[in-house]
Image: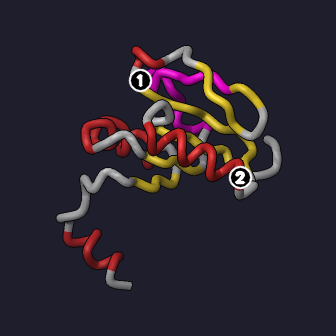
Amino acid sequence: MSEGWNIAVLGATGAVGEALLETLAERQFPVGEIYALARNESAGEQLRFGGKTITVQDAAEFDWTQAQLAFFVAGKEATAAWVEEATNSGCLVIDSSGLFALEPTYRWWCRK
């Protein structure tokens, strides 16, 4: 493994995903490997990250044990489909969908 975090970005081809990739690169976030994930219709697309080209992978085919950290920026449906598999694989998930916003534990953590 390279130095840094192995990061998956679910929703990498959307506006938020592309902005997140750009920000991670600009801020020189310590990235070992970066995995751009999306629905199968976007698989194979090419994106730029930190001066190199990365290929978008189908989220349905992704092995979540490869990622230590995942940003879920694809919406509630995608979060619902993949969050359990990602977290059960030991991946720390940062979710922007709001899927869990009404959960009591969410409100408890946000008050800290």
Q: Residue at (54%, 46%) from the top-left corner?
A: 19
Residue type indicated by callout 1: Ala
For the residue labelled by badge 1, is the local secondary structure a helix, a strand or a loop? helix
Q: Is residue 90 visible?
A: no
Residue 63 % position (x, y): 53, 30
Q: Residue at (37%, 54%) from the top-left corner?
A: 96
Q: Dividing the image into 4 quarters, which one contains the C terminus?
A: bottom left
| In magenta stretch: residue 45 | no
Q: Earlier in the sequence, mark 1 or mark 2?
A: 2
Q: Which residues are magenta?
A: 54-66
Which disc is residue 103 wearing? none
In the displayed structure, 60 sits above or below 17; it is above
For the residue labelled by badge 2, is the local secondary structure a helix, a strand or a loop? helix
Q: Residue at (28%, 69%) from the top-left corner?
A: 106
In the displayed structure, 56 sits above or below 77; it is above
Residue highlighted by disc 1: 60
Cα distance, mark 1 to mark 2? 29 Å
Q: Residues within 10 Å of mark 2 (few under 14, many from 20)?
A: few
Residue 110 is left or right of residue 86, and the answer is left
Total marks in image: 2
Q: Residues within 10 Å of mark 1 (few under 14, many from 20)?
A: few
Which disc is residue 26 wearing? 2
Residue type indicated by callout 2: Glu
